[in-house]
Structures are given as C-alpha cells and as structure tokens.
Amino acid sequence: MKGYIGKILFVNLTTGHIEDRIIPDQVYEMLLSGVGLGAYVLYNEIPAGADPLGPENVLGFTSGLLTGTGSLMTGRWMVVCKSPLTGGWGDANCGGTLAPAIKQCGYDGIFFSGISEKPVYLLVNNKGPQLKDASHVWGKDATESEEILIAENTFKKRPAAAVIGTAGEKVSLIAGVCNDGGRLAARSGGGAVMGSKRLKGIVLVGSKPIKCHDPQAVKLISQAYANKIRKQNLPGIVKGSFLPVMGKVMGSMKQVAPIDGMMFATMMKKWGTPMSNGMGVTNGDTPIKNWAGSSKDYNRSYYSKINSDYVIKREYRKYHCYSCIVGCGGVCDISDIEQGKFAHTHKPEYETCAVFGPLLMSRNLESIFYINELLNRAGMDSISAGHAIAFAMECYEKGLLTLEDTGGLDLTWGNAGAVIKLVEMMIARQGLGDLLADGVKIAAQKLGSGSDKYAIHAGGQEPGMHDARFDPMMGVHYSVDPTPGRHTIGAAQYYNMTRLWEKVSWAPAVRMYPKNEEYEATDREALKSVAGSCYKQIVDGIGGCLFAQIMGVQHWQAFEWLNAATGWDKTPDEYMLIGRRMQTLRQLFNIKHGVEPKSFKMHPRMAGEPPLKEGPLKGRQVPIEAMMKLHWKHFGWDENTGAPLPETIQQLELDQLLQEG
Amino acid sequence: MNDHSTSFQLLIDQDKGTAMKVKVYAPPFLNGDAIDEMGNLEVPTGATLRDVYKKLQVPLLLRPVLLCSVNYEKSRLDRVLQEGDVISFFFPITGG
C-alpha cells in the first residue's frame, strides 16, 4: 500500500506472449514510477544500437506513483521508448483519463516489444490482457478509432484508451499517441514506434483499487491545495487584450522577481495556455518567423487576431484531466470552419497557436482551430509539424524549394490556406508532405543545399514555442536534457515560481535580480537548472502536471504527498537525489545507445547566433556551450562530454539497478 | 481605520518594538529591497495592507488596478494583517 502496484505487464508483439512482471520495491524507492520506472525497464531491455523502429525497441505506457492516491494534478500518463527522432531516450506525457486506468488494471506500466504481423490492440479487462485484431480501425483517425474501440468494449464500465492516428500508422517520426478525443502525448515520436509495431492502441477496463499508505493525510494536503485554487479567479474586467500590454511591460523589465505561482492558476482557469498568445509575442517569449523574426514583424495587426479571448469565445465546455481542479482545457465549436468538416476540437494549446501563428507569420485563427483538429485526429505533434512547415517556408523564400517542389503551393509566410494543404499532405505523406513528416532534421538531410541552416531543432527534436533568448535556462534544458528540445523541463520562470529553495537545502534562493544574470554562465545559474531538472524528474515520476509544479512547492506539495502515499518519510533533499538518479539514468540510456550529449546543442539561431536586430530580444545571445558544461558539471557528469561520471553512478547506486549489455 | 489612525498605531507599535513577518510576492517593478530571500517582509504589529503598499512603494496610480490578495482572498487596503499572512500581487507569466 505505497501508492504503486509493484507490477508491470510485458507484451511481446512478435510472439504474442504476455506476462506479468513483479518490480522490486527498491526500484520505486530509487526511481519512483512513471518515467523512472520506464527508464529502468527500457535501459535493461533494449540492447545497445537497437533500431527505434525495429522489434528490439520497447514501448511503454506508465502511470505516476501518485496517480489515483487522492492527490491532485497527478493524473498524467507517459509514453516511453527509444526515440526515432533523436536516437536516444524518448518520452512524452499527456493528461486525460488513461493514467488511473493503467493502475486500475493492476499495473504501473504496460510495455511492448516485437512487431505484430497484423494490426492489433491490447485489451485489458476482467478476463485479463489479450491482443485483439485492429484491422477494422487501421486507417481510421485517432478520434474515430478511439470511439470505436471504446464502444466495442464498453459493458459495465467505460474503458480508457490510447491510440495512434494515421500519422503513427504511416510511421511519421513526429507522430504521438492520443487519448480522450485528440489529446496527445506528442513528443519523441512515440506514435511512430507504436505504428512500427502495428499496435493501434490499448484499451483498459480495470476496477482494482489504488491503495496508499495514509489516504487521510493525502486528502488533507489535497484539500488545502484545492481550497486555494478555488479562490483563484480573475475579475471579469481583465480582458485578453490586456495581456499583450502586460507582455510589453514584462519584456522591458530590467529586474526579475519570483511571483506567487498561485496567481498563474487565475489565468489558466480563464484562458488555459492560450493566455500567452499575444503576451508571448510582446515580451519575446514566442519565436517568430522560424525564430528569425520579432514582434516588429508579427506586430499588433497580427497578434491582435489571435487574442486569447477569441480562442475561448469558441469554448463551450471546460475540460479537466483526471485529478485536475484547474481545468485549463476546453472543447471548442468549429462547426462553421472549413464547411463544418469537424463539429468541435479540443481548445488549441498555446504551443499550437504559436507554431501555426507567429512562427509562420499567420494571423488566421480559424485555420489554427482547423489544423489543431487535423493534427489531433492524425496524431501528429503540432510543435514539430509547425516547425517543419516553417522550415519549408524559409526554404521557399530562399529559393531552395520551388513551386514545382511544393506541388504548386505558394509557401509565402502567412499563407494559411497553403499551410492547411501542406498539413494535409504531411498527414497523407504526399509530395513535399512526405519529406516534412519526419521532422526538420531529416527533411534538411534529404533536401541538402545548406537547408540545415533553417532546420530549427535540438538533437532532432523541434523545440517548444518558448524562446531561449528570452529565458536562457529554457535553452539549457533544450540542449542538455536526454529528450532535447523540450519546453517542459525547466526555465528560469519555472524555477522562480517553483520555489524549490524553500524546501531543498542546495537549491539557490531567488529574490529580485537583474534580468542580465540569466544570460551569464555561472555556477549559480547552473545549480538552478540542475535543481529544476531533478525536480521535473520527480514530477514525471509521480504523474504530475507541469502547471501544478510551477505553482510552487508551498502550494502543490509533491514531497509531502509522496511521504503520505508511500510512508517513506524522506526529506525533500532525498527526493531530489531520486530525481538526480532518474535523470542520470536517462542520460546513461543515451550513452548506451551511442548518442553524444554534445550533439543535442540547440540550433545556433535559438541561442542568438546571429542576434536579432529588433524587438524585445534585440542583441540577446546565450552562451549555450558554457552553460551546458556547467550544468553537466553540477550534475556530476563529465563537463566536456556530458557522460555521467563513474563516481556519480556509484554515488547514485545506479549499478544496483542496471544490467550489463 | 483610516490612514491617519493606522500610522498612529504603527508609531505606538514601533515604539514598543513589536514587529511581525508577512510573506509578500511582489512584482519586479515594486520595491523588493525589504523582502528577504524567503519572501518575508517585516512590518509592525497591526500593520494594514496599505502599510505594505507604502513599504513596497506601490505608485498611487497603480493601486486601483493592481490585483492583490491576502491569503488568496480579495482584501481591502485597510485589512489588518496577521503574522504569517501571505500577500500576493498578480503578475503574468508566459507558459504552456
């Protein structure tokens, strides 16, 4: 009764063999669950050099240690695999309803090796786990497939399901895994791995209880948190049009101060992530025109068209993930767009709005809603897809792609109609779309002619829509994390709001400081990025939500919940050591598979090389190599290569968990 | 309690040497010098939210539009603060 189940399901899709495996308590005490459990299984199961799209790769679905214990904002599930995009560790996570269902079926994780001869899905119900034919849904989009599989398997209880769309079936390397009608675990190319295994989905109907050590103590912490969240509401007079003005103020500030993360909830409740649509442009956070433009290009006449209020104007229902009390999601009416092809779509996230708005110089919000639904149904990562199109637009501008290459599409910046058509071509893998459907790194390799200058990525993964020249620590995490290019790992903004220093002895305390400090490669900044990285592993081990994390440890009390749920009585410092171990194991996975950490350094343009000539980030440059070295050093990794040092591996007792080979 | 009476009370408290700590999350355009690393601000016992505004040098013009809460609830400027109260100012961040 420690919050976790202590068991995983392992399925060999080549042979059809299915078995339960017991996971020792020691693994949970050393790595938690979620991503940590995934790293433990994948490190030991996948041989060095395995083809990410071959039978030796292992794909896993894991739940968080705190999922289902009564804690809040801990309902995210994770996909783990060897990533076909980076060649190294891959993971992605998503909200929705799948995470508790994994545990209710009696497992902390479900793992697949091998390749099935024909399309299948895994059903786990009261008859146990079984592989079933999925030919009838192969070729259908993710939303329709999920509806069919759920309808077929609903008797007393509605199942939870995760599926791939057609992008995953066609092994697009930027395909993700979907649940709840188009929510994606989008990154790392997990959908491509699933497609390569001919695994269409998993359908889970479990009713086993999720027990923990002290449910009452968990509940008390949850109540205190919920009571604060409930009170967080913005006055009606605060409109979306105010946000770009606030962004301008933010962008011009010479000083930074850690604010109360609870205030973040007020904005998330009202707008969800599209709160950043205009604000990000004016403060410099949003990359513009394939990271080469600024708010001088994407000016008010543009960003006013993607105003946060216009997004929620279409929202007719709020959407909460499992165990969430904020509800930043929503369902939007799009029945009047593109001849009513789709009735509704999940509210597009900021990432999708930004990548199909400012990054492409588009101000057509309707096209963004429509593309959002196209990609959700196809199961394709919107961040990567948008970057691929930005790459194509810049190549078109520079003459590396012609009208003949594009199939007659005029890929001028901002041409929303052409963007829609190109998205459809990517999903169908037709013409230029086929080139772009594997992400920008591979597209540039195939196109050649120096096009890699316009392929914005870190280690093969297209970056999130947060500019490293605005928040250099974001760039550090883009470049040092074993899953590069990820905007959800850490940033100065996140660190300042999370307030780890209130509970972790070695995390540097922050009060007001000059913004310029963020642009210096110092031991103090490196310690902050290391602390953020360790804590994020804990969050991904418990199934936590990033938005809860950045509300701060004084509010969202992960350490306290963990002790109450497990009965372990560990200090925050001891949990941070677990986070360090998890991150080091993910890095060791990459080393085992021949990935050079240095190769994950973000694209020079992202670090301000060359610097922007105007806008809030004018002249800003990030000394990224020096920052990467200091981050590695403070992690106990070789500061020149990024490989974990032998003494660090020993100190973290990782040798106890790892098998040779 | 009006401004005058607050100040009078503060003088008495300062004479007595009684002080308390409240936690303040202040945006960077306010005077954060008085706030320590743990975010605490020392004020005389009996201080009000208006006194905190003064200490943080909140510009008069901003006061009506600045969103501020005490213990995560809307509060009037004449609210008398208690030891350990949490004062949060709204300031946006970008994310998502």
Image: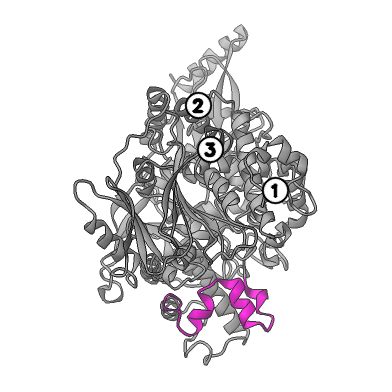
Local packing at callout 2 (Cα closer than 10 Å; few below 14, some 14-19, many 20+) is many
Identify the disc placed on residue A32. 3
Task: Name the residue furthest left.
Answer: A155
- The mark nearer the N terminus, 2 or 3, is 3
- With A449 as the anchor, is A137 left or right in this view? left
What amino acid is found at the position of numbered circle 1 in the picture?
Glu
Question: Which percent across, then down, holds residue A486?
Answer: 57, 56
Q: Is residue B65 visible?
A: no
Provide the residue span drawn in magenta. Answer: A426-455
Q: Is residue A650 visible?
A: yes
Q: How far apart are marks 2 and 1 (CA)?
A: 34 Å
Residue at image x 73%, y 66%?
A609
Task: Please name whichever residue, A211 or A335, is drawn nearer the observer in this view of the structure.
Answer: A211
Q: Mark 1 points at which residue?
A: A518
Question: Residues at badges 2 and 1 in contact (C-beta under 8 Å)?
Answer: no
Q: Mark 2 lies on which chain?
A: A
Q: Mark 2 points at which residue?
A: A563
Task: Please name whichever residue, A153 or A526, is drawn nearer the observer in this view of the structure.
Answer: A153
Q: In this view, does A370 lie above or below A29?
A: below
What amino acid is found at the position of numbered circle 2 in the picture?
Asn
Colour mode? one colour
